Image: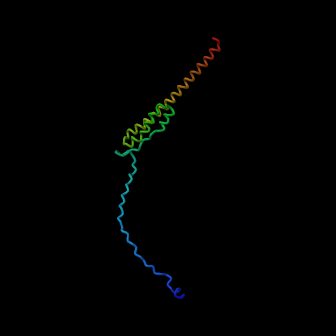
Amino acid sequence: MSETDLTSAPTTSAVPSYPQPAYPSYPQPAQAPQPMQAPVQYGPPVPGAVPAPPPSNAGWAVAAVVFFWPLAFAAFNHSSSVYPRWALGDYQGAQYASDRAKQLGKISLGLAIGLGVLFFILYGVIIAAAISGIEDSTSGY
């Protein structure tokens, strides 16, 4: 082969093309229809509709711990049973537990205020008695 033969050779070589294998087409799974969202309704609740869960009133249970701890046990018990009752479908029981936790918290707050007022009254009586005792001992009679 001469030098001219090399330069005159075609620069592109023919690459044999191989046929691509055909992939079988599998049927695509049908997509489930998307559930429609219920429209927002205003007015009274529809019979059979699930009401929203009532508040647990855990704050009132904490207030019971702070102000009058003996009621805190019952307040926390009722407060923690709101959601399980609601989840089981006992909507009236959940509302009762919520109301009861709030009621016990308010009772403990009232008792703390009442005991505080009673304490200050008793403290005032003791101070008044001590002052009158001092005056009687200084008068000589």
Q: Quadrant of residue 22?
A: bottom left
Image coordinates of residue 120 in percent, x first then y, are 55, 26
Is the C terminus in the top left, top right, bottom left or bottom right quadrant?
top right
In this view, the residue in front, 73 or 101, is 73
Residue depicted at x 49% and y 36%: 62
Is residue 90 shown left or right of residue 136?
Answer: left
Q: Residue furthest top?
A: 141
In this view, the residue in front, 117 or 13, is 13
Up/down of 128 relative to 41, above or below: above
Image coordinates of residue 28 in percent, x first then y, are 36, 63
Residue depicted at x 63% and y 14%: 137
Residue depicted at x 45% and y 79%: 15
Image coordinates of residue 67 in percent, x first then y, are 51, 32
Residue depicted at x 46% and y 81%: 14
Q: How is the image coloured?
A: rainbow
Image coordinates of residue 19 in percent, x first then y, are 40, 75
Q: Residue furthest front?
A: 1
Up/down of 65 relative to 44, above or below: above
Is residue 141 shown left or right of residue 91?
Answer: right
Q: Quadrant of residue 93?
A: top left
Up/down of 114 relative to 82, above or below: above
In this view, the residue in front, 69 or 132, is 69
Up/down of 118 relative to 101, above or below: above
Number of labels in the image equals 0
